[in-house]
Image (cartoon, grey):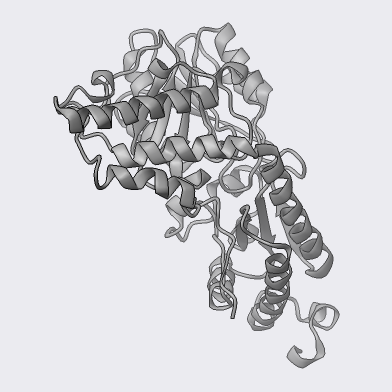
Amino acid sequence: MQNIYFDHAATTPVDPRVLEKMLPYFTDNFGNPNSQHVFGRRAVTAVDEARDTVAKCIGAKPSEIYFTSGGTESDNWAMRGAAHALANRGKHLIISAVEHPAMLSAAKELQREGFEVTLAPVDGYGVADLAKLEEAIRPDTVFIGVMAANNEVGTLQPVKEIAALAKARGIAFFTDAVQAAGTLEVNVKELGADMLSLSGHKFYGPKGVGVLYVRSGLKLARLVAGGHQERGMRGGTTNVPGIVGLAEALRLSQEHLHENAAYVAGLRDRFVARVQKEIPFVKYNGHPENRLPGNANFSFRYIEGESLLFSLDLAGIAVSSGSACSSGSLEPSHVLLAMGVPEGLAHGSIRFSFGRENTAGEVDYAVDRLKEIVVRLRALSPLFPKELKNEVFPQEVK
C-alpha cells in the first residue's frame, strides 16, 4: 500500500536544505542572542540576517518584521494589538466570515472585552463581498482583517481592493497570508497591507515559527511582557534555529515560485477533472479559477466527511476534513456555511492539498481509491436514495 500525503495546507515537510541551514544553531552556534559573548553574537547575527531575508522576500523593511511562534500568534497579535492600540479612536472591527479560527477566536475575546466585531459576508465562492464590507464600515471602525487565501477552500480574496478601501478611510488593514506565502507572490507594498502574517511550516520550513509584518508608523499593543526581544514587543527567548529555517524556506520558495505553482496546479487540475467526471454527486467548493494552485475541496453528497477521511487514511492517503486547527470539531465548516453550502453537504467535505513532491501517479491512485471508497460508503448510507443506486453503483455492491 502506498502512503500519499495530500494535506500540504495543514503542514509541509521540512526541505532538507532548510534543515541543513538550521542544524548548526542546535549544536555549535547554540547561543542565546541576548548573551553578550561570541556565542550570543553569532546567534544575533543569524537572526538579523534572517530578518533581512524575510523583509526582502515580501518587500518590507527589516524593522517591520517581527518573529512569532506561528500564524495563530501573528493573527492574534495583529487583531488584538491593533484593537487595543487604536481603542481611543474606536472599538469596531471588521473581519470576513471565512477567516481562520485564530481570527474568529480573537474576535470573541475582543467582544468580551467590549469591542464590536462585524463578520463581513462572502459569496458562494467564498469571496468577500466588497459592497457589503464597505457598508459595514462605521466612523469608529479601526481594523479590517481579510485573509489573502482561504485555508479550507483555497479562494483568493481581493486584498488590494480591500486594502485601498481601508486606506481611504484611515483604517488599519491586516491580511493573513499564511496559505499564500511560498505559493504565490506576496509583496506587502503591492498588496497595500498594514499588517501581514506568515507561518514557516506552510512553505517547507519548520513548525513553531512565524512572522508578523507591521508597517512602519503603525503602533500595536505589546504581545508578551517580560523581555526586550523583538524590539520590546514580544518577550521570550528567541527561537534561533526556527527563525533561520523560516527565512531559508521562504527564500528557497521564491527561486522557482511560478514553476512550482504551475506544477502543483497541474496535479490539482488532473485530480479535479477526474473526480468531477468519475464520481457523481460531488460539489467543488471555492472559486473555480481564483484559488490556491494546490487546493481542491470537495463535498461528497450522502457521505460524512469524517468517514471518508478515515477510509482514505486506511488506504494510505492523508487528507483533511477542513482546517487542521479545528479538525477535532464535529461541527460543519464555518467557511462552507458562510458560502451558503447546506449543512448536510458541508459535513461531507474533504480538502485535498497538493505539494511539489507529489506526482501524477499518486493523483491517479488516490482517485481510484476514492471512487471505491465513495461507492462503499454510499452503499452503507441510509441517506442515499435507493432509486439512484442502480445508476451509480457497480453491480457487486447493489
Q: Is residue 44 left or right of residue 184?
A: left
When asked about the image quadrant of residue 192, the answer is: top right
Residue at image position (72%, 70%) is 367
Residue at image position (77%, 41%) is 289
* Residue 184 seen in this snapshot: yes
Residue 26: % across, % down: 27, 47
Residue at image position (63%, 55%) is 354
In which quadrant of the rendered image does the N terminus lie? bottom right
Residue 9: % across, % down: 55, 50
Please tell me whether residue 229 is drawn above or below residue 14 in the rendered image. above
Query: Across the whole image, how many numbered discs are drawn on residues?
Result: 0
In which quadrant of the rendered image does the C terminus lie? bottom right
148 or 239: nearer the eye? 239
Q: Is residue 247 left or right of residue 154?
A: left
Residue 64: % across, % down: 41, 18
Residue 195: % across, % down: 47, 22
Q: Is residue 55 left or right of residue 373?
A: left
* Residue 110 seen in this snapshot: no
112 or 169: nearer the eye? 169
Residue at image position (64%, 44%) is 154
Q: Is residue 213 left or right of residue 7?
A: left
Please tell me whether residue 130 is drawn above or below residue 363 in the rendered image. above
When asked about the image quadrant of residue 4, the answer is: bottom right
When asked about the image quadrant of residue 115, the answer is: top left
